[in-house]
Image: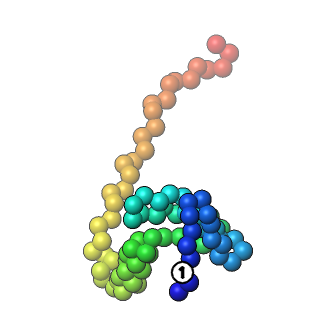
Amino acid sequence: MLVLSRHRDESIIIGDDIVITVVDIRGDKVRLGIAAPIEISVHRQEVYEAIQRENRQASRLEPHDARQIERPNPPPPRRDPPRRPTRPEGD
């Protein structure tokens, strides 16, 4: 693991297109700003681990389990407003 020291408003560059900037330091908390291409997902570690758990659980879903998942109610049928009678042409 590479360990670097940075002050507020200083950055670290990863590759050619990821920039991590120290935005704020308050006590034992450091706020980081991360600029990365849209195709690179950036998550806090605990969020990433939760996503991985959910993905593993979903991949183990059996077809009979899927039938037990409650489906949302279908939208109510659309009702068009009543039409006004049209006048015959020439009136």
* Residue receiving disc 1: 3
Q: How is the image coloured?
A: rainbow
- Coordinates of residue 62 in the picture (x, y in percent): 34, 85
The x and y percentages for residue 37 are 65, 68
Give SS at disc 1: loop
Q: Position of residue 82 (x, y in %)?
A: 45, 31
**Would you place residue 79 above or below residue 24 in this image?**
above
Q: Residue furthest top?
A: 91
Q: Position of residue 84 (x, y in %)?
A: 50, 25
Using the image as rendered, state which of residue 62 and residue 45 is in the foreground: 45
From this viewpoint, is residue 39 visible? Answer: no
Q: Residue at x 33, y 65 (%)?
A: 71
Crowdedness near tag 1: few (<14), some (14–19) or many (≥20) residues, C-alpha within 10 Å: few
In the rendered view, does 46 fall on the left or right side of 23?
A: left
Which residue type does callout 1 highlight?
A: Val
Is 86 displayed left or right of 67 in the figure? right
How many numbered dots are placed on residues in this image? 1
Residue at image point 29% right, 80% down: 65
Relative to residue 14, is residue 75 depicted above or below?
Answer: above
Residue sitting farthest toward the right? 16
Q: Residue at x 45, y 70 (%)?
A: 44
Residue at the (55%, 73%) spot, across then down: 5
Q: Is residue 73 visible?
A: yes
Residue 5 or residue 69, whichever sits in front: 5
Q: Quadrant of residue 57?
A: bottom left
Quadrant of the image for the C terminus? top right
